[in-house]
Amino acid sequence: MKKRVAVLISGRGSNMMALIEAARACDYPAEVALVISNRPEAAGLQHARDARVKALAIDHKAYATRAAFDAAVETQLAAEGIELVCHAGFMRIQTEAFATRWLGRQLNIHPSLLPSFKGLHPHKQALDAGVRVSGCTVHFVTAELDAGPIVAQAAVPVLADDTPQTLADRVLSAEHRLYPLALSLVASGRARLEGGRVLLNALVNSTDPLFSPTP
Ligand code: GRF
């Protein structure tokens, strides 16, 4: 049985589409059953509908409190029998109560090698810091922003003439591969949260480091 997944978005939804497409494979352990955007104008809503996935706008501006917005999301998750939630460019902070209730069942993708460069403008932060390698991270969601236990990471080189946009594009290609991998590990039970850490039962290449620059 595939796990029923909701994807929460605020924008264009390219990571959402990567998850929808990966989940179409019959041996993939999850299906995207619902997409919710807190922004009614998010382009990703139409992309989801074009892919024949149920997509709803729940406009956070219509709710007086964070708790009321979270409750409206929760109602839709329950109505669709959702078991796992994936944040994909979802620009809302959740209440601690919601994060705690869904602990171990909510994932987020962030375009940096966490714990470096949390929050906004991670690519500018990476360039300002002068790192030679950046990347992306999928982690379990906790109440603290971009700080939950890490499930999977992918690294990309930073080039001498990178701008925040060229680095973002390179990292985004990695995100589109990493998020489906991480979701499949969690949905199949091969990655799970235990005692605040992620226990992983998966292949890891322990021989080939990523050099930047190449030796
Ligand atoms: C991605 O880089 C994601 O990691 C970040 O916001 C961006 C969303 O892009 N949190 P998309 O909406 O998935 O195309």
Image (cartoon, rainbow, N blue to C red):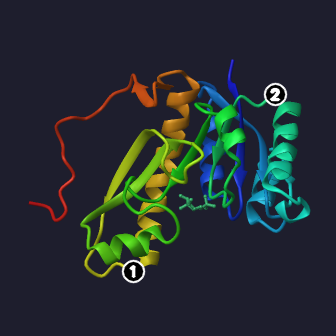
Q: Return the x and y of residue 158 as percentages of the image width and height.
A: 29, 68
Q: CA distance from mark 1 to mark 2?
A: 42 Å
Q: Which amino acid type corresponds to the residue marked 2 in the rendered image?
A: Gly
Query: Which mark is first along the chain, 2 or 1?
Result: 2
Residue 54 in sight in this render: no
* Quadrant assignment for the C terminus: bottom left
Q: Residue at x 44, y 49 (%)?
A: 137
Q: Return the x and y of residue 7 as percentages of the image width and height.
A: 70, 45
Q: In this picture, is 205 found above or below 114?
A: above
Image quadrant assignment for residue 131: bottom left
Viewer-closest of 169 and 186: 186
| Crowd class of label 2 (few under 14; some 14 to 19; many from 20; radius 10 Å) | some
Q: Return the x and y of residue 66 as percentages of the image width and height.
A: 79, 54
Question: Count of labels shown?
Answer: 2
* Quadrant assignment for the N terminus: top right
In the picture, the disc for residue 163 is: 1
Q: Residue at x 65, y 35 (%)?
A: 100
Element type at mark 2: loop
Q: Is residue 214 left or right of residue 169?
A: left
Q: Which amino acid type corresponds to the residue marked 1 in the rendered image?
A: Thr
Q: Residue at x 50, y 29 (%)?
A: 185
Residue that carries the numbered disc 2 in the rendered image: 81
